[in-house]
Image: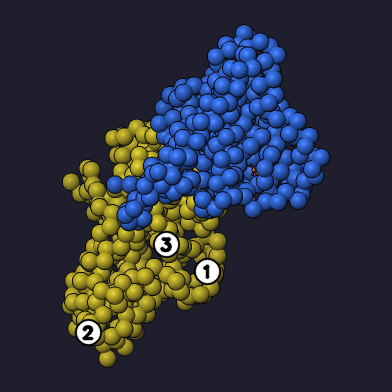
């Protein structure tokens, strides 16, 4: 398949947007300018961008505690995601949600989720809607390797396959669940192997290779849309930073981290574009600069936004 | 037109009518299709609505409640049957952390219109894991509505309202009421959520109850009227939001209140109701309100033990005599 340079540059830009968003947050948290906690996806950008690149605009995704990248990759406005993190009225959830609890219905982002594995059945339900209402939509559920130990994972994949629902189960396997390595929380070393138990294809993919991720999801989405049911994707990647802001990463070696950094999905993709002549060095630099500026503006927007006011109990029930 | 129907038929009629009216309404649950559900409440619905809308699920309570939440978020209106209320423990994550919160955290346009039907209560010797009344757990979860009908007509009217509601509704059905017959309106019948019903009028003593315990309350009221005590019997019908106005009005008028529920008395629904009476009608009370409820034990299997654990009309009468003495 011949690749359009403008599309490829769009992928690169989307990854830089996520990288700068997350690095800005790391800095803001470090300076205590944002409350609470958050889970950053630096190093995992190709998973989010690659997967969303394979989807139609009206397809839907849902996500986890580590969800900023998914939201942005699906088309979320960085200003409003940032404002939500700052607890501002202009945030996607008007400040009621915060890092792990926001959604963008208009762009098909069915929400991040503070409960490990909790979103997998919910996404399966969205796929049930898509099937019963013949919308032609596909749903992608993102979750971590740790979430595959939850009963919700097993229950949802069984139903998704049993009912041949249009869904892609996308495991962002960064080899750790907080401090616990995959080998200590999973009886099998490949998440993809688990697919056999549900009668669906299980696919391993290099999660730091954006085009490989995109193509794997495109195949799975086509299968789902064609009425053949779900696929489980085991997307191998690595989180560069700590699990959350308090994590000193004492459970991993510096060598392991350095090796992972050499597989940086953004630098790798950037080098590929240069090498294959899709873009010049100055074009590539401009794309990054553009992303950096977008995030600076997002931070300014968030900081200038008003705090939410009024009765916090006012929106508990739908009218 | 009104005819006599069993509660289970009234519930089925509400579902069937709403499914005809709105094709977004679907049913999910274990053995609800061909088999018609453990208590036959969904019997026959598969035939009319087909397997796309009457969906048998695997035994995955958390999973299929989560699927229903996702379906509700994206345009369907699921009614989920949990075979026995006891099994709702397995689905608490999806109910408490997901269904109850999504409207609040995901924004104004996002709603979770779903009903969880929970066959509850003891009295049939099913033992510790098939007899519980766990109602009070749900009233302290913001975002849920909690409904528990007593009469067959209310069963139909409240279920209809629950299906039309854009919030997750915990719908508690007492197993012993399924086979009780009563007049039920034939056509569309909606009973607004949040309104208690005065099922007997009197000025001497208020008895506040809901679900199956309304039977005990009425039996006691009848016996008490023979000795000249006229009871006001309030059927709460909705546990969240509580009908404060009806509760406080009755308590203030009679000045004496007995509250009766089947669930464990400690931390029960009536603890909340009693407190609201203290807050709203304290100056009118002639005596402290008395709560009757399930004893603090798992529900035993043997009939003699199960009976003694549960509150009854005799308990109400005994307490009334003390209060009025
Ligand atoms: C039900 C539940 N248990 C525990 C947690 C605390 N927790 C948050 S994220 C996490 C690790 C999740 O690991 P994984 O699924 O691999 O995702 P990752 O953080 O690696 O992206 C844990 C234990 C939680 N949020 N929810
Ligand atoms: Mg992980």
Do the CB atoms of the residues marked 3 and 1 lie less than 8 Å apart? no
Q: Chain of mark 3?
A: B
Q: Which chain is blue?
A: A
Q: CA distance from mark 2 to mark 3?
A: 39 Å
Which residue occupies the foreground of this view, B124 or B295?
A: B295
In the figure, B199 relative to B67: above or below? below
Q: Chain of mark 1?
A: B
Tag 3 or tag 2, which sits nearer the N-term?
A: 3
Q: Position of residue A273 (x, y in %)?
A: 65, 16
Of discs 2 and 3, which sits in the foreground? Answer: 3
Q: Residue at x 28, y 54 (%)?
A: B193
Which residue occupies the foreground of this view, A88 or B198?
A: A88
Tag 1 or tag 3, which sits nearer the N-term?
A: 3
Do the CB atoms of the residues marked 1 and 2 lie less than 8 Å apart? no
Q: Position of residue B17 (x, y in %)?
A: 30, 39
Q: Residue at x 64, y 53 (%)?
A: A246
B11 left or right, relative to A178: left
Which residue occupies the foreground of this view, A302 or B66?
A: A302
Of discs 1 and 2, which sits in the foreground? Answer: 1
Whether the residue carrying mark 1 lies under 8 Å from ligand 1 is answered with no
- Does label 2 lie on the same chain as label 1? yes
Q: Position of residue A175 (x, y in %)?
A: 72, 40
Q: CA distance from mark 3 to mark 1?
A: 23 Å
Q: Which chain is yellow?
A: B
Q: Position of residue A311 (x, y in %)?
A: 32, 56
Residue underneath mark 2: B227
Disc assigned to residue B299? 1
Q: Residue at x 68, y 39 (%)?
A: A239
A158 left or right, relative to A74: right
Residue underneath mark 3: B140
């Amino acid at each position: 398949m011949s690749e359009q340079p403008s599309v490829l540059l769009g992928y690169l830009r989307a990854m830089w947007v996520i990288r700068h968003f997350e690095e800005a947050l790391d800095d803001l948290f470090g300076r205590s300018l944002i409350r609470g906690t958050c889970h950053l996806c630096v190093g995992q950008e190709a998973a989010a961008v690659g997967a969303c690149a394979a989807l139609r605009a009206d397809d839907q995704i849902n996500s986890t505690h580590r969800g900023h990248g998914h939201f942005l990759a699906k088309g979320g406005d960085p200003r409003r995601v940032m404002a939500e993190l700052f607890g501002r009225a202009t945030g996607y959830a008007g400040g009621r949600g915060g890092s792990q609890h926001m959604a963008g219905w208009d762009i098909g982002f069915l929400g991040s989720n503070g409960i490990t594995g909790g979103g997998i059945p919910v996404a399966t339900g969205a796929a049930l809607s898509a099937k019963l209402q013949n919308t032609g939509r596909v749903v992608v559920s993102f979750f971590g390797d740790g979430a595959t130990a939850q009963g919700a994972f097993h229950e949802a994949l069984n139903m998704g396959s049993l009912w041949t629902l249009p869904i892609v189960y996308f495991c962002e396997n960064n080899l750790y669940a907080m401090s616990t390595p995959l080998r200590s929380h999973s009886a099998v070393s490949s998440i993809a192997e688990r697919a056999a138990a549900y009668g669906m294809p299980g696919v391993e993919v290099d999660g730091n290779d954006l085009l490989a991720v995109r193509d794997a999801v495109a195949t799975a989405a086509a299968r789902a849309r064609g009425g053949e049911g779900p696929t489980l994707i085991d997307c191998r990647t690595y989180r560069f930073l700590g699990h959350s802001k308090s994590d000193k990463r004492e459970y991993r070696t510096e060598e392991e981290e350095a090796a992972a950094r050499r597989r940086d999905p953004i630098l790798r993709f950037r080098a590929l574009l240069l090498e294959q002549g899709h873009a010049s060095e100055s074009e590539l630099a401009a794309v990054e600069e553009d992303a950096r500026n977008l995030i600076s503006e997002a931070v300014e927007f968030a900081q200038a936004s008003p705090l939410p006011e009024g009765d916090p109990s006012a929106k508990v029930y739908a009218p | 037109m009104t005819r006599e129907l069993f509660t289970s038929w009234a519930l089925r009629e509400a579902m069937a009518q709403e499914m005809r009216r709105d094709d977004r309404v679907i049913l999910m649950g274990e053995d609800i299709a061909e088999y018609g559900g453990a208590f036959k409440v969904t019997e026959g619905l598969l035939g009319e609505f087909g397997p796309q809308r009457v969906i048998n699920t695997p035994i995955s309570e958390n999973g299929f409640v989560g699927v229903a939440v996702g379906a509700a978020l994206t345009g369907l209106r699921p009614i989920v049957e949990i075979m026995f209320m006891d099994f709702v423990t397995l689905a608490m994550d999806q109910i408490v952390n997901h269904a109850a919160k999504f409207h609040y955290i995901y924004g104004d346009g996002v709603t979770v219109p779903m009903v969880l039907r929970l066959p509850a209560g003891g009295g049939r010797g099913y033992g510790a894991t098939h007899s519980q009344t766990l109602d009070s757990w749900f009233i302290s979860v913001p975002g849920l509505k909690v409904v528990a009908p007593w009469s067959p007509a209310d069963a139909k009217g409240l279920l209809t309202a629950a299906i039309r509601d854009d919030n997750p509704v915990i719908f508690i059905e007492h197993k012993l009421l399924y086979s009780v017959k009563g007049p039920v309106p034939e056509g569309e019948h909606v009973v607004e959520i949040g309104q208690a019903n005065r099922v007997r009028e009197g000025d001497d003593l208020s008895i506040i109850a809901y679900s199956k315990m309304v039977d005990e309350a009425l039996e006691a009221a009848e016996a008490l009227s023979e000795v000249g005590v006229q009871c006001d019997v309030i059927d709460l019908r909705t546990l969240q939001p509580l009908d404060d106005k009806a509760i406080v009005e009755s308590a203030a008028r009679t000045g004496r209140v007995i509250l009766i529920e089947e669930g464990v008395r400690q931390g029960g629904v009536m603890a909340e109701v009693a407190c609201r009476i203290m807050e709203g009608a304290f100056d009118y009370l002639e005596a402290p309100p008395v709560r009757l409820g399930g004893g603090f034990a798992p529900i035993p299997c043997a009939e003699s033990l199960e009976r003694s654990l549960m509150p009854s009309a005799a308990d109400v009468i005994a307490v009334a005599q003390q209060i009025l003495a």
